[in-house]
Image (spheres, rainbow, N blue to C red):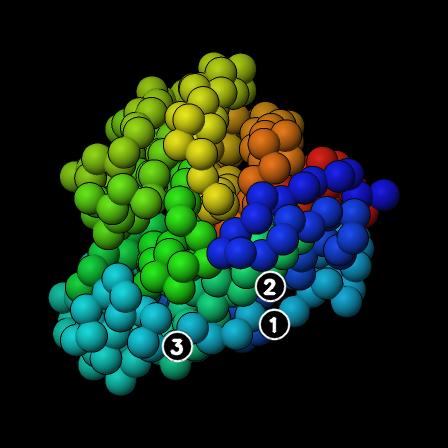
């Protein structure tokens, strides 16, 4: 049985009980793998392998899985420049911009990028109705106003924040970023917006070399282990609760894992799942809807990354029930 979560009234809508609704749909980008050259750092197949695991292990009811809609270009332009959006959509980015992005600008990548942002927005809308939503993609926090970076084309959580606020759906949003890499794009795009709080736990000695200060920063030393990390998470959650958000957008990156090639932290699979469970339990305790997106994951073997992603859904099920 789902546990009771009484959502606060928003925009004149009466509060609803989670017991009266299904757990929100889980969205996924319904495209083929991004075509990459052999040996490329980015593990494009992880999304497909995760979806296969979700279906095989019945991590969520089959009817709750849905292909993500593509985001509208007009919504992308709430945070990105029209010129950049147009250049991506027409595959006309110059060579230097593509190199900075780190991925070839193919039709599959563009379609997936649109679905990644659209999935996060759909998950947020679902969470506002039911208490929780998930996107099996997203967390593209290195995308800036007029350029992509670090495998991130468009910044999904920045777009979602602006859409929900400008529609007057919510008044205050907390972005809790637990990807090991600092969310420089998100911090830059949300800077000066008092309606959005950016809280970021990140490896201090990791990408990007040039950080952009979020509202609340928790730079972490190399090789940090489970207990120290989870203690820092409690400080981050204190900052979130003091802000009193209407929704939490949670970047549940699994690259803090010890085996991650790009992580430099030393969390275990159990530690990551405890992190996820704590975030979801916090949202439930405070009656705040929560959306989880994937963020980074680059472990070898790739099965560790996929398992860690799946564990985020398992943690949500542990907290909210089946």
Question: What is the spatial separation of the Cα atoms under label 2 and label 1, in whole angstroms?
Answer: 6 Å
Element type where label 2 sits in the image: strand
Where 3 sits versus 112, above or below? Answer: above
In which quadrant will I find the N terminus?
A: top right
Q: Residues within 10 Å of mark 3 (few under 14, many from 20)?
A: few
Q: Mark 2 or mark 3: name the one nearer the start of the chain.
A: 2
Residue 94 in view, yes or no: yes
Q: Mark 3 or mark 1: name the one nearer the start of the chain.
A: 1
User: Quick check: marks 2 and 1 in contact, CB under 8 Å?
Assistant: yes
Identify which residue is drawn at 34% across, 71% down. 75
Which residue carries the number 1 mark? 67
Question: What is the spatial separation of the Cα atoms under label 2 and label 3, in whole angstroms?
Answer: 17 Å
Which residue carries the number 3 mark? 72
Element type where label 1 sits in the image: strand
Where 320 sits versus 111, above or below? Answer: above
Return the x and y of residue 265 as percentages of the image width and height: 42, 27
Identify which residue is drawn at 78% across, 64% down. 62
Which residue carries the number 2 mark? 27
Q: Residues within 10 Å of mark 2 (few under 14, many from 20)?
A: many
* Label 3 vs label 1, nearer the camera: 3
In the figure, residue 100 lies in which quadrant?
bottom left
Return the x and y of residue 243 as percentages of the image width and height: 39, 32
């Amino acid at each position: 049985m789902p546990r009771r979560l009484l959502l606060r009234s928003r925009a004149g809508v009466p509060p609803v009980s989670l017991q009266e609704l299904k757990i929100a749909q889980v969205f996924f980008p319904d495209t083929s793998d991004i075509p990459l050259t052999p040996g490329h750092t980015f593990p494009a197949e992880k999304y497909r392998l995760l979806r296969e695991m979700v279906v095989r292990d019945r991590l969520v009811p089959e009817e709750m899985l849905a292909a993500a809609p593509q985001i509208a270009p007009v919504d992308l332009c709430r945070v990105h420049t029209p010129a950049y959006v147009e250049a991506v959509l027409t595959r006309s980015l110059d060579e230097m911009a593509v190199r900075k992005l780190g991925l070839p600008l193919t039709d599959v990548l563009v379609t997936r990028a649109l679905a990644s942002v659209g999935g996060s927005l759909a998950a947020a809308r679902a969470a506002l109705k039911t208490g929780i939503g998930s996107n099996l993609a997203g967390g593209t926090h290195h995308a800036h106003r007029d350029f992509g970076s670090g495998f991130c084309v468009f910044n999904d959580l920045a777009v979602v924040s602006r859409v929900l606020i400008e529609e007057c759906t919510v008044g205050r949003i907390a972005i809790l970023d637990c990807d090991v890499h600092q969310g420089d794009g998100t911090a830059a795009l949300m800077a000066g917006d008092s309606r959005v709080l950016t809280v970021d736990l990140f490896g201090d000695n990791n990408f990007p070399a040039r950080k952009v200060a979020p509202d609340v920063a928790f730079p972490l030393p190399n090789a940090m282990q489970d207990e120290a990390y989870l203690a820092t998470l409690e400080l981050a959650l204190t900052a979130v609760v003091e802000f009193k958000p209407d929704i939490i957008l949670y970047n549940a990156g699994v690259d803090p894992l010890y085996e991650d090639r790009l992580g430099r932290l030393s969390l275990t699979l159990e530690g990551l799942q405890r992190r996820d469970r704590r975030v979801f339990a916090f949202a439930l305790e405070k009656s705040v809807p929560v959306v989880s997106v994937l963020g980074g994951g680059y472990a070898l073997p790739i099965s560790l990354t996929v398992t860690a992603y799946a564990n985020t859904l398992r943690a949500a099920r542990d907290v909210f029930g089946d």
